[in-house]
Image (cartoon, rainbow, N blue to C red):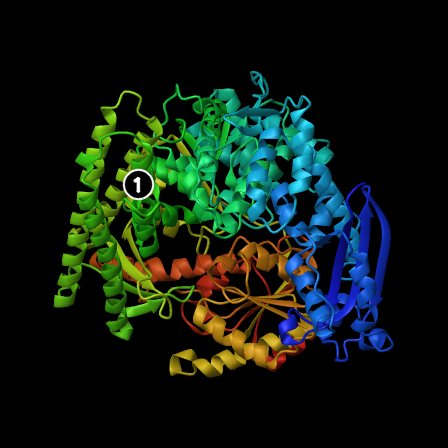
Amino acid sequence: MDKKYVVIDLETTGHSPAEHDKIIEVGIVVIQNNEITDEFSTFFNPNMPIPSFITNLTGITDYDVQEAPVFKDKAQKIINLFDNSYLIAHNVPFDLGFLNEELASNGFKQLNNPVIDTVELSRVLYPQAPSYKLAQLAEHLKIMHDNPHRALADAYVTAKLFLKLKQKIKTLPYETVVHLLSLEKLLKSDIYSLLQEQEQALAFSVYENDDIDSYKGLAFKSTKETKTVNKDINTAFGNFLDDIYESGGTMQQQMRKYEKRNGQREMSETVYDAFRMKKHALIEAETGTGKTLAYLIPAIYEAVSEKKRVVVSTYTTQLQSQLMDEEIPLIHNLVSIPFKIALLKGKQHYISLEKFERALASEQADNYDITLTKAMILVWLTETVTGDIDEIQLPSSGYLFYRKISTDTEGSIDPTNPWFSRSYYQKARKRAQQADILITNHALLCTDMFNDYQLLPSYDKAIIDEAHHLEETASKHYGLKLDYVHVQYTLTQIGDTKDGNWLSKLLTNDPINHESFLMDEWDNIYNKAKYEVDDLFRTLFQYVIEQKQKEKSLSDIGRIQYRFDEVKERSAEWKIIQEMATRLTFFIRDLIHLLSQLKHSFLKVKDVDKNNLEDLTSIMEALQSIIDSLEQLFLMDEENKNVKWMEIEAYGAKNAVYLYSEPTDMSTLLSNDFFSQKDSIILTSATLTMKNSFSFITNRLGLTSDQTETTKITSPFSYMEQVQLMIPDDFPDIKHGELDDFIYSTCEAILSLAEITNGRMLVLFTSYDMLRKSYNLLRETIDINKYMLIAQGISSGSRSRLKKNFQTFDQSILLGTSSFWEGVDIPGDDLSCLMIVRLPFQPPNHPIYEAKAHHLKKEGRNAFFELALPNAVIRFKQGFGRLIRSSNDRGIVFVCDARIIQSRYGKYFTESIPSVPITYESTQTLMDKAWKWF
């Protein structure tokens, strides 16, 4: 007889029975023989008011439950339904926790059925799902879900989800099932029998799936190379563009409601001309240009006709994937010529099958997150063709485990190694070498530049999208970062000779003479090194705390920043820090020496395990990297070529210190190492100019006017009709110490505008501290039953998660800093008002700005007009661009900072954005106008 599965879903008055929250609705669905055979649902009277946010979420009111039974009346019925069954829920701890609390408080025995959590099982079996919330999963798996947040409807959807999960298990290969069985005991879900059934079915049959390969007990999706035959192009470029852009062209055929954008074709022609003339180009393409297609079209023509690859670099790996998933399929339909395209990321993004296979074979005890991570990866390997870990969302500490099994940990791999031909990274490199268009990211592009072009396949022409980030990214890659967690993590992974970590296992498992290794000496030096690390970072933390307040600044996530250099730091305390750093480098050198001795003894063994040699080499390199960083940060006099600073979290751990070093000026480095090495680099972004001038970005990147073409492509949007720019003339002046009054006025304006726009507001701050204070004030005054208040760094979740929450709730207000100033598209009615609280100048004591300003002043130049103002204008343009993302968008930009009107530099802001109606009046007058506008 088939097993009985009973699915339950509850609606409650809150999140926790410990807070005296109660069940208000139960929905139960019974599954037998893979069919839904029974159901039960009822309201419960909780004998307490239902909070309004629960009513808004579920639609259940006090009226609905006033005549309903109390839980005790139906408890036995519920118990009977679960007799001799599995209990299934979408988040078992929540539903079973509430159910058992109600049973116990009413004198009934708690349920202890075997459980299956469909959240957990979905994470394992659908590792590439975009979300594991029930509604999003249902949409992803095409399960109808007509009435979310009602108990019976959710129970039905959960039941259908479980049946899909059950079916998915039957598609898994034998090797994957065997590994999952070994992990199952540490999962929350009791799926042993489901996995065992599949194991037995496969043990007595032939698993036929040409898409799956296996090696050393690990199953993974086979990848077959697709061959694209390149053809010679016999069409002139102008005709090529006609066939795409003009009336009856492929763009009109492929895109609904196509309207030709003259700027888009103009940009394509500009890119092609720069390629032909072997010149660099700066192209500012305002919002709505369609710049991605505009640069890809000439890039493809150039690459195929010249038979030389063109590199396209995006700012982030997410934008890389977005371009590959959304723009490239469209491009294939637009252009008539076949072309090869490939995506390449850094080695750390690709899983190492060899390292993962060894991790599975390891007997090291795992916690829950690592067990779940291994299970997810096992299933994902049967689906992925790229091995790019960005395809899945691992649990929090799962990423620490992944760091141990990424390709980055392999070192140099022998091509004769059987894993080499199966390496995802090597396959990605091969595709990159064969590609006409190679899509990479700024980080890898700069790493390649820094390593004398050893990582990417050779290229002479490139397109840099979001080019305003190039200097910042290059600076990070020519600099360094070191923090306490990284150093201690590196040492802990090695371990001493007794603690069960890598080193003790190595010495236990390999039958060689270890007398030369001097175990006691290792343990002694190792423990001293760990102590010195902790002592150094605690001393640095205290050193920053003791510095004068005026010498410190706050980062945009609230960390205290302190800039240090050899000239400034002459105190006795700093000399002690330098001595501590020197002592630590000595201890780490001793560890490297002992590891070198161990490696030498391994080399004497005939059948030495090559994996151990690789591990030793990579660990020695990691330790040497720490020494190099410590010496550059504390022990080298670099004549102010680099800016160095520390960051601490004032209320965090007393050793949580982050150390940074970056070049003060990147222009010469970029000019010599990049632009002079390449034929043509196209730099594009929506924000490259200040008052229509490219001089700032040209100077910062080291470009010269004789080698660089500049073009500005205006937006096709009607900003005069779509936007109102409003500035209040009666806000308190922060310069006169009225910060609290300014924050109060800002919050009042947020509340007033929210009433007018029904929420749908994005509020951009330049200071995390001001954001936090505003959030706390708004929480006290806002109608939380009407508006959803979301704040970066306070509300849980990533930037993309906060954006989704903002779009999910109709009347949302999103408070953001730094990363929300750009790269967040919220088109249509989801966003109606953008508030810019302060003009986005960096604080004058921000470490990087302070050092660059000092560098400019030494050259007799004006740091404000050549650095502070251009940076602020470009950031302002990025923020302004959040509001209008399509020709149908409409809204208000409300700038709380009157300097945009009153100061002599204010026109640099207003004349750097598209022409819009500007109103500078009292707050009340602006609100009256806003009412009429909407």
Residue 907 rendering spot, x and y as whole percentages: 46, 65
Residue 108 rendering spot, x and y as whole percentages: 74, 69
Residue 781 rendering spot, x and y as whole percentages: 60, 81
| 330 or 334: nearer the viewer | 330
Residue visible at 40% across and 65% down? 841
Q: Where, quadrant-wise, is the C terminus in this rendering?
A: bottom right
Vertical side of 137 occupied by 326: above or below: above
Q: Where, quadrant-wise, is the N terminus in this rendering?
A: top right
Residue visible at 39% across and 37% down? 408
Can you tell which quarter of the image residue 168 is in?
Answer: top right
Vertical side of 750 occupied by 161: above or below: above
Is 559 left, or right, of 804 in this rendering? Answer: left
Can you tell which quarter of the image residue 260 is in?
Answer: top right
Tag count: 1
Identify the amino acid type marked 1: Leu
Q: Which residue is mark 1?
A: 503
| 792 or 293: nearer the viewer | 792
Look at the numbered disc 1 and give the secondary structure of its residue. helix
Residue 278 rendering spot, x and y as whole percentages: 40, 30
Residue 126 seen: no
Residue 82 seen: yes
Vertical side of 299 occupied by 27: above or below: below
| 697 or 777: nearer the viewer | 777
Is 331 left, or right, of 734 in this rendering? Answer: right
| 420 or 164: nearer the viewer | 164
Q: Residues within 10 Å of mark 1 (few under 14, many from 20)?
A: some
Vertical side of 378 occupied by 534: above or below: below
Is 401 left, or right, of 74 in this rendering? Answer: left
Residue visible at 75% across and 79% down? 49
